[in-house]
Amino acid sequence: SDSDDGIDVNGKWQLQLNLVPAPHFISFRVKPWKLKVDYYPKKLNIDALRDGSIVELVNLSPIDAMVIRLNEVRVEDVIGFGSTFGGAVSQWIGDICATQLHKFLTSA
């Protein structure tokens, strides 16, 4: 049986991480930074491309030393790491599609 100090009867630590509540981020901010991308596609999914998958356009041609600027992002009042990082990535993808998509097209 478990004791109150987190050690079981055999002297082993009991990690009860499922009891730790997810963190609440009042404000999460990442300053602007640059990302250098080298990408060599292995497979193009023609069906996905026909269905309108814009992401599949990346697989048309290799990308060599492309620099993408990731703007500052702020995520506020979220619970959990998944929601926090998902919110940041979503903002970056939206900005890249709106302002830097031409870099992907000109590298093809």
Image: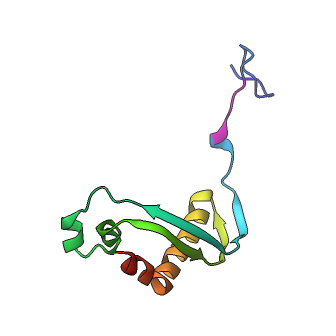
Q: Position of residue 12 (x, y in %)?
A: 71, 20
Q: Magenta stretch: give its range.
A: 13-17
Figure label count: 0
Q: Residue furthest right?
A: 5
User: Where on the picture, by quarter, is residue 80?
Assistant: bottom right
Q: Position of residue 67 (x, y in %)?
A: 54, 73
In front: 2, or 83? 83
Q: Residue furthest top?
A: 10
Q: Residue furthest bottom?
A: 99
Q: Position of residue 47 (x, y in %)?
A: 18, 66
User: Where on the picture, by quarter, is residue 62?
Assistant: bottom left
Q: Main secondary structure of the magenta part?
A: loop
Q: Quadrant of the N terminus?
A: top right
Asked if the stretch drawn in magenta spans residue 83, the answer is: no
In front: 8, or 70? 70
Kindly identify the residue that appears in the image at 61 percent across and 65 percent down: 84
Left or right of 86 in this view: 59: left
Q: Position of residue 102 (x, y in %)?
A: 42, 84
Left or right of 98 in this view: 72: right
The image shows residue 86, relative to residue 13, as above or below, that is: below
Kindly identify the residue that appears in the image at 45 percent across and 66 percent down: 64
Kindly identify the residue that appears in the image at 31 percent across and 72 percent down: 57
User: Where on the picture, by quarter, is residue 105?
Assistant: bottom left
Q: Quadrant of the C terminus?
A: bottom left
Left or right of 72 in this view: 108: left
Kindly identify the residue that appears in the image at 68 percent across and 32 percent down: 15
Asked if the stretch drawn in magenta spans residue 16, the answer is: yes
